[in-house]
Amino acid sequence: MSEAEWSLVCELRWLTATITSIQFVGLLVGAVIGGQSGDYFGRKKTLYGAYFLHAIFNVIAAYSINWQMFAALRFFIGAMVGKKLSNLDMDRSYGCSVVVVVVVVVVVVVVVVVVVVVVVVVVVVVVVFY
């Protein structure tokens, strides 16, 4: 995020640090809730849910229309990171699970690239023909 994109310069420069602080508050909340949901639903389901939602929130945050929306999404992104950190089992080797996570991340990246390409093509067509 550039500071000039939403006019976060001069008297609004403090918002950049505030948005970062909001993300860390989300991390704290996510760590508390993630531990409880990991005990209730199971660590594996909680981790995969956090990975999925983390990807979704990041994609949405990339297309934020104002700093308030961006700040709210950064809170949820922080919460998903907190959930993941509180559910990692450092004593076990995940082996197969790591492969599944890598495949899911690759699929999400491919989907995001396809969506961005489609949006760019649509914008170019609209600009050229209208």
Image (tube, rainbow, N blue to C red):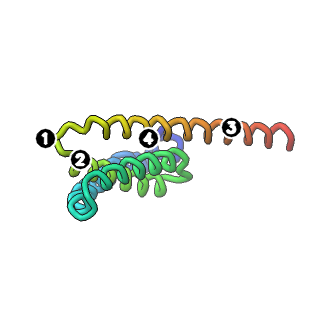
The residue lying toward the viewer, choosing from 87 and 24, is: 87
Disc with the residue nearer the chain's start (2 vs 4): 2
Q: Residue furthest right?
A: 129
Labels 3 & 2 near each other (Cβ < 8 A) = no
What residue is shown with label 1? 91
Residue type for callout 1: Asp
Q: Position of residue 27 (x, y in %)?
A: 27, 52
**How far apart are the two marked residues, 3 and 1, measured between alpha carbons?**
45 Å
Q: Residues within 10 Å of mark 3 (few under 14, many from 20)?
A: few
The quadrant of the image that shows the C terminus is top right
Q: Residue furthest left?
A: 91
Q: Position of residue 78 (x, y in %)?
A: 33, 50
Element carrying mark 3: helix
Residue type for callout 2: Leu
Residue 53 seen anywhere in this rendered image of the structure = yes
What residue is shown with label 3? 120
Rendered residue at 37%/53% (across/down): 49
**How far apart are the two marked residues, 4 and 3, measured between alpha carbons?**
24 Å
What residue is shown with label 2? 85
Q: Position of residue 83 (x, y in %)?
A: 28, 53
Which-is-in-front pick, marks 4 and 3? 4
Disc with the residue nearer the chain's start (2 vs 1): 2
Residue 29 seen anywhere in this rendered image of the structure = no
The residue lying toward the viewer, choosing from 79 and 20, is: 79
Q: Position of residue 18 (x, y in %)?
A: 34, 51
Element carrying mark 1: loop
What residue is shown with label 4? 104
Residue type for callout 3: Val
Residue type for callout 4: Val
Which-is-in-front pick, marks 2 and 4? 4
